[in-house]
Amino acid sequence: AAVKISKFKEMVESKQNNANMEVIIQKLQKKHDIEKAQALKELELYKSKIKDRETKIAADFQLKFESTQEKVEQMNAKFHEKIVQFDKLTQQYQIDINNAKQNNSSSIDELRKKYELEM
């Protein structure tokens, strides 16, 4: 009879240990689920911040690019304007030299001095 009682006590203790283990496992599982949810929330927040940062960087780059492109176009237009002015001045200079050759050679030197000052 003592053996049966002993076996019964062991079975009861075993069931209590199993029940305690199940409670512990459930608590750990719940804790794990909470930590997992928090980690996923933090990951999504981080992804959102990174996406916002990348969007801002892209927008800033686009603004700088457009600004630089506009400046280059303006400089290019000014450069072409200067070329046109130079061509007109050169043509006028040639016309004046040809006219001066027909009139008098001393006025050629005066024209050269005048156009050297203009350039």
Image: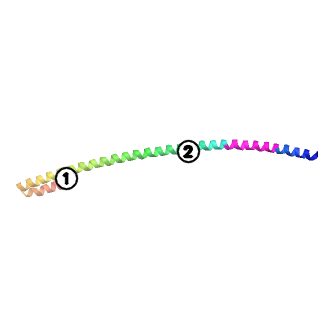
Which residue is at 15% across, 56% downward? 113
Query: Front-most of 72 and 94?
Result: 72
Q: Which residues lie in the magenta part? A: 15-32
Tell me the distance, in whole angstroms, between the alpha carbons under discs 2 and 1: 64 Å
Q: Neighbour class for label 1 at 10 Å: few (<14), some, many (≥20)?
A: few
Residue under circle 1?
118
Task: Check the picture and name the quadrant holding the C terminus.
Answer: bottom left
Query: Front-most of 4 and 103?
Result: 4
Q: Amino acid at mark 2?
A: Tyr
Say which mark, if any, is on residue 46: 2
Q: Position of residue 28 (x, y in %)?
A: 71, 44
Which residue is at 59% across, 43% downward? 42
Task: Check the picture and name the quadrant holding the N terminus.
Answer: top right
Q: Amino acid at mark 1?
A: Glu
Query: Front-most of 54 and 84?
Result: 54
Left or right: residue 112 compared with residue 25: left
Q: Position of residue 59 (x, y in %)?
A: 43, 44
Say which mark, if any, is on residue 13: none
Taking the view exactly as shown, the residue that stands out farthest to the right is 1
Q: State which quadrant residue 60 falls in.
A: top left
Which residue is at 44% across, 45% downward? 58
Q: Neighbour class for label 2 at 10 Å: few (<14), some, many (≥20)?
A: few
Disc 2 on helix, strand or loop? helix
Q: Position of residue 48 (x, y in %)?
A: 53, 42
